[in-house]
Amino acid sequence: MDKVAPGVYRINLPLPWELDTVNVHLVELEDGFLLVDAGFGTDACFGALEASLLGSRIGWNDIRKLCITHMHPDHVGLAAHILELSGADLLMHADEAEYLAQSANTGRNMAFFDKALAAAGTPAELQDRVHKSFTQIRNTFKVLRPAWPLRGGEKMPVAGGTLEFVWTPGHSPGHMCLYSPEHGYLISGDHILEDITPNITWHPERDTLADYLGSLEMLIPYPIRTVLPSHGNPFEGHGEWIRATHQHHAERCDRILQSIGQGSDTAHAIVLDMWQGKLSAFHYHFAVLEILAHLEFMRRKGRLAASSGEPAIRWTAA
């Protein structure tokens, strides 16, 4: 556990993936602590969290509130167990709680993920391997009912000031950041990360990339001095990071258009072209859904046209 801002402590927890750690944050309240995010649902992750708390003489009943930035498994995995041990109040965006409930109540992926893989032109054998690669993760999802369903704009007193809850959709529909106007830090979840760009996943009837870029733009005027991300170290210069990330996604769109011009007319074919078939089924899932998000973004901008196939969608330059 290390202090990363006034009244804020970071705990680094292990993950069983290439992205091998996730940060959760403790924020001092006038009485007890707010815990931001809950790590992954493994014994190793729970053991590291409990050891860090006990090593700082913080008991579970000192955790008064638990805020989940979003429902991805490395952020929500231990939430139900932590709530049971601590009796804390849960804070979570209402849309994200609904998204989690949908994920927890299905034996496979949600129906729209099945439709997305089919629309991408993903072969049936690969679809099956993608589903199997997520079996363990899906089993960690549990329905959570927030005591305080967030919408964005709420404020909460903490030791030495306040926290503002900022709704930042894109990486996930109900993603939340926490901003301190007194101390200028932003607990950014996966919205802004130190060295990588967050995965932007396609969702039905949404333009998730436009949501994400708009959420970034909204944060530019904030006088943020320090970004406290869920992966990597605290850093400064959020405005420069946002501009670089806009450029990254513009270049990704241009590369997709190039791939389509060379004959890759489905999302699956674009993934094979851009990653040269080197992705595991687990990582293919993220790649193809992000490609679908970029395709939908460009379709709405008038840069691409889509035609229904059986079952794959075919893409051409507009």
Image: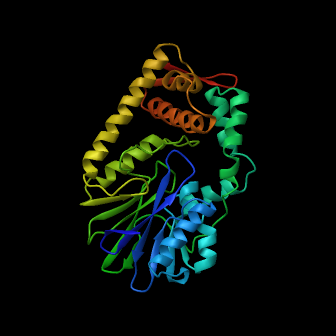
Quadrant in the picture for residue 5: bottom left
Residue situated in front as seen by the camera: 208 or 117: 117
Residue situated in front as seen by the camera: 79 or 301: 79
Q: Position of residue 112 (x, y in %)?
A: 66, 42
> Residue at coordinates 73% horizontally, 46% vertically from top-left?
108
Identify the image quadrant of the N terminus.
bottom left
**Badge count:** 0
Residue situated in front as seen by the camera: 35 or 109: 35
Q: Is residue 148 above or below residue 192?
A: below
Q: Where is residue 180 in the image (x, y as percent from the top left)?
A: 32, 69
Q: In this view, does 276 lie to the left or right of 184?
A: right
> Residue at coordinates 34% horizontally, 81% vertically from top-left?
159
Q: In this view, does 157 lie to the left or right of 175?
A: left
Q: Is residue 18 above or below residue 300?
A: below
Q: Position of residue 60 (x, y in %)?
A: 55, 80
Q: In this view, does 95 lie above or below 25?
A: above
The residue lying furthest to the top in this view is 262
Quadrant in the picture for residue 133: top right
The residue lying furthest to the bottom in this view is 31
Identify the image quadrant of the C terminus.
top left
Residue 318 in view (yes/no) = no
- Figure coloring: rainbow
Q: Where is residue 42 in the image (x, y as percent from the top left)?
A: 62, 60
Residue situated in front as seen by the camera: 27 or 209: 27
> Residue at coordinates 32% horizontally, 48% vertically from top-left?
217
Quadrant in the picture for residue 228: bottom left
> Residue at coordinates 46% horizontally, 52% vertically from top-left?
169
Q: Is residue 41 above or below residue 306?
A: below
